[in-house]
Image: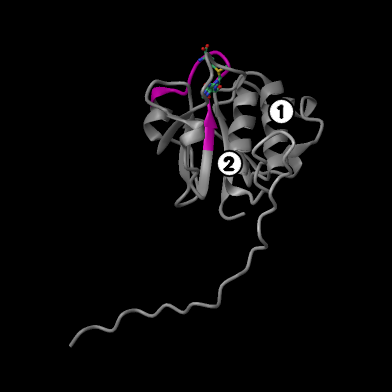
Amino acid sequence: MRGYFAIGAEGISKPMNLGSLLRTAHAFGASFFFAIEPAFKIKEVKHSDTSDAAKHLPLYTFSSVDALMLPRGCALVGIELTDDAVELPSFFHPQAAAYVLGPERGSLSPEMQARCDHLVKIPTKFCINVGLAGALVMYDRQICQGRFARRGTNPRAKPEALPEHVSGAQKIRRKPEASE
Ligand SMILES: C[S@@+](CC[C@H](N)C(=O)[O-])C[C@H]1O[C@@H](n2cnc3c(N)ncnc32)[C@H](O)[C@@H]1O
């Protein structure tokens, strides 16, 4: 798979939710995790994350939205159920993306929404659990970017295997010569 992604949460208040998000992010191959103003000590997460993901996945904490630092070229994607957000099934996942989720009893702050390059919503009737929302976004990225056998056209049809990937010949790009 090309590119990388990270998952983060703003103002998260339940260690259980952060632990579950961390575990899911680790399972889906996230490159790092970030928390902005978490409302508890990060150490407490250990009790809720039995996979000890924090040992395998870098976890960065930031004291404010302004303090948040991301790698150059990494798009910040806010996950929030707002009117103007793009629906997840129609969203093109950036190659380098940091997805950020909001607090359990609130939404992404206006400052965070303003900082986001994209806002994406999961088409549900109302807000779902933050850990579950994160898992759905990661799953969607996985099915969009992974090379999986195509679904059958009916329940009895077998998935259609994709052809083997063949790398093209080496391409050397030269700068066009300056015209005289
Ligand atoms: C449980 S929700 C927050 C509660 C919600 N604002 C309310 O109605 O009370 C926590 C976070 O999960 C994410 N979330 C939950 N459902 C979502 C959806 N359908 N689309 C996008 N994000 C969602 C958002 O990041 C949200 O800030």
**111, 44: nearer the viewer:** 111
Residue 27 spot, x, y in % from top left:
73, 40
The image position of residue 26, as x and y in percent, is: 71, 40
Can see residue 35? no
Magenta span contains residue 113 = no
Compare residues 115 and 84 and report the one nearer the observer: 84
Q: Which label belongs to residue 141?
A: 2
Mark 1 sits on what residue? 20
Residue 121 lies left or right of residue 178; in this view the side is right
User: Could you tell whether 37 is left or right of 131 in the image?
Assistant: left
Give the percent coordinates (x, y) of residue 135.
Answer: 64, 31
Q: In which quarter of the image is residue 34?
A: top right
Q: Is residue 25 above or below residue 124?
A: below
Residue at the bottom extreme, as displayed: 180
| Badge number at residue 58 | none
Gap between marks 1 and 2 measured at Cα = 18 Å
